[in-house]
Image (cartoon, rainbow, N blue to C red):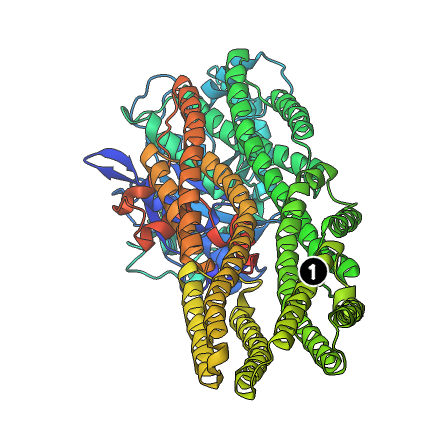
Amino acid sequence: MSKQQHGKSGVKSEAIVVLRKGKPQLKLDRLETILHNYQDHPVAIISVFGEHRTGKSFLLNFLCQYLRENQSADWYKKNYVKLVNTFHWKGGVERDTTGIYMTDKPFMLKNDKGQDIAVFLMDTQGTFQKKFKPGECSLMFGLSTLLSSVHVYNLSSGLIRDNDFQHLEVFTKYAQALTERNGEGDAHILSPFQGLMFLVRNWEMSDYESGSKGGMEYLTEVMKTDEDGNDSIRKQIMKSFSDVRCHLLPHPGIKVTKYKDSSRSSIKLADLDESFLVGVDDLGNCLFSKENLLVKELNGGTCTGKEIMKLALEFKERIKSSDTPNVDTLLKINETVGFCQKLQDFEAEYERNMITEMGENYMEPKKLVSLHEKCQEETLSKYAEHDGLTEEKSLANKNYMRQCLSVAFKAMQHKNNARKENEKILIVGKAALAVENLYLDEMEKVASAQYLEDLTTAREKAVSATEEAFQTSTLDCNQDLVKKCMKDLHNAVKSKHREFKRRNAERLEILDQKLSMLVVETTMSYEASMEKEIKKTKSEAELDRAHQNAHKASVKRFEENDLVKGLGLKSKKDKVQSLSDKITECFQTLKKDTDTPKSENEKQPEQDNKMNYVQQQKEAQAIFEKRKDLALTYSTAFNDHREKYVEDGELYKIHIKAKQQALKAFSDFEKDISSVAIENYWENKDALEQELEQLFDQVKENNVKNKKNIERSLNPFYEELSADYLRTMNKASRNASDSTLGTLHEVLVSSINEELNVEIPYENIQQIAIATCEGMLIEKQDEVNNGRNIWKELMDQAGASTVGLNVGKTGSKDGRDSVVIESILANFNVNISQLASIQFLKSLKF
Ligand SMILES: Nc1nc2c(ncn2[C@@H]2O[C@H](COP(=O)(O)OP(=O)(O)O)[C@@H](O)[C@H]2O)c(=O)[nH]1
Ligand SMILES: [Mg+2]
């Protein structure tokens, strides 16, 4: 029991029905405010009704006092305590309470099941003076009957008179209508109402002891008497209420009945006769003790604040045209709201069964469909067992229920799809890992850091090793999905293979450079050895032989060089050929020189040329190395973004900056270059620029891959969101007006957008996600509306309202006003951050 509910700050009473120009008006907004925090709480409403001036309000204050003192045994012995003034009362004969008042806060009590029950007290000012047609009752009487779990019938004449039964005739009609509908003897038909207590005030007869024990004895006796044909009424009353009690309460004592007004005079407990106080204590125990507390029920199910609200709402809709509800109306209200409640319970049960059977993993769609069919049938037949309606009505309800379950199923399908998307992400991740860990290694096993002329065999080996590793790592995944993700593996392989090809091309370039140097060196050493020969030999034949020997030896040495050894057949042949050509050319020049010997002056430039050539080759090597070095430095600028997506504009900025740095460094290098190598330098500068662009292409490709990963990671979110949306909207579609439902849709969309704005750090992806969600939810809205139309038809047939909670009353319709958003979400019990989809979104690491 929580103290603050009924601490000194006090519980007040609020009018929920007022009389305006003599006409009773139901103030739904007040009731809504009172029940707001107890939407999902089991509720008990104890209503005291009867003629005015019979001490109802007066008594209710004692019950409040009793509850405020936490039902303690000695509450009434505290003489000095002043009585609370929760319900206003007034002495004299003038009528005070008009309409229905109820406590604005509940007393939180436990029942015998240990549940926390929100207990409200209600003060109903009925009048029995007016003549109603048979089966009709006053609005206030009807409403308090509908809402309360215990109806306390306050009788001030000191006994139960036959006339008092007459006033309850309306209930007997109720019971009759029920038995006629369902056939007498139908065991499972529950009494439409719960508790009825005859509270006999001013009890002074000595035949029965005051309190509840004497009361029950007295009631039994009264029920036996058979006068004025009231016998059948008595019987019917017992049928209409599941729990009929009686309590005999003595007079409070003359001291208090003299008081004029509860707000002006403060009553002390000492002012009351003890017998009265003892009686109230006994009454309190009868109403509020764990064993006796009656929770409001509807067709056997517990009522929460939400259902109370629905009952009141239906009531208001149905009695719009008159202020005298008849029995049939009350019955229909109970039926409609009872059906809604059952619908929810059965829907929840269906969902629970589905979730249990679905387990944790993705399920094949066909299997899921048959599971749904099974669970749906179970639920529908269980429903059929419970409803006590006519066949026609039951069929219509069942049809609607089927529609609800099909929407619930759609939500399940989305949930299942979310699991599928998650599993796919897992599998694609494993594919990427296999490729990342294995592919290049496998290629290198063949290449061993050398240029590879033919990649075919290496590629085949690497692909099959990668595939195998992937398959081993996905053994416990869904194999259909593994198969479907094979193409993702191959795409990853393709991209890795392109990386290897680039690596290989680079090796070729370096190798070519080295080989050119080797050709030059070999030719030069050939030339040196031939020059020696020329000095020794004179004859042409001898010279030719010397050339052939030197040529052979050079080629042999060339071929034996490690660089050449590693070459493939074709490029080896090409390189040997180019060496051979160079040597032959050199021999021709040497021969020409021996035929017409050159002067020393002529020899010098030739010597210089040779030197220049060597110089040029050396510088070319250095330029090449510089270029490679700068390209590598350029690549490191993107180190942070190898795994992490960056928006295109940002990426471009990094590229421009790194490129400028590289080109500047290369320009600075120009001053060290001699004129012989300058042409080579320029060629390399162009090549560098091209190379940087190519590297950037690779970076972009990788960035696209990272972006795709993010987009893929959002797929489960979209599915979860569809599921959340369908469930939320479908439930609301039964409690909201068209415009409120529209507003709820907008509120959901804008709240989701806000979450996406916060959670996704990339504007372009964020915009795509927002557009995707909006489009998707509009589609789903159509599905919800289809269901709502069927619901409307069903309710029309039942003559019930489909107006629902009018939460849009705050005015703004665009759903952007944060107050409106909050109030709407609260009204439909939606907690955005608790939605599975939003929790998933928050778990993503971008
Ligand atoms: N005789 C008698 N008078 C009572 C009793 N309880 C309250 N009264 C007096 O009845 C008058 C009307 O009480 P009130 O609670 O306003 O009656 P209501 O119109 O039924 O709510 C007040 O003057 C009370 O003092 C009772 O048990 N017996
Ligand atoms: Mg009153």
Q: Left or right? Give the position of 16 relative to 552.
A: left
**Residue 471: image location, x then y, percent:** 77, 46
Q: Is any atom of residue 144 visible in this view?
A: no
Q: Nearer the viewer, residue 131 or 493?
A: 493
Image point (44%, 57%), residue name? 272
- Residue type, label 1: Gln
Q: Is residue 406 above or below residue 40?
A: above
**Residue 320: image location, x then y, percent:** 29, 27
Q: Nearer the viewer, residue 331 or 164?
A: 331
**Residue located farthest toward the left when viewing the structure as drawn:** 21
**What is the number of callouts on the image?**
1
For residue 737, which quarter of the picture?
top left
User: Is the residue indicated by label 1 positioned so its CB lies within 8 Å of ligand 2?
Assistant: no
Q: Is any atom of residue 526 visible in this view?
A: yes
Q: Is residue 681 above or below residue 51?
A: below
Image point (50%, 70%), residue name? 684
Q: Nearer the viewer, residue 743 or 774?
A: 774
Q: Left or right? Give the position of 795 relative to 544.
A: left
Q: Few, some or many C-alpha atoms within 10 Å of disc 1 (few <14, some 14-19, many ≥20)?
A: few
**Residue 742: image location, x then y, percent:** 35, 37
Image point (52%, 33%), residue name? 341
Query: Which type of secondary structure does the marked residue at label 1 adopt?
Result: helix
Mark 1 sits on what residue? 577
Q: Nearer the viewer, residue 496 or 313?
A: 496
Looking at the rendered image, the quarter that the N terminus falls into is bottom right
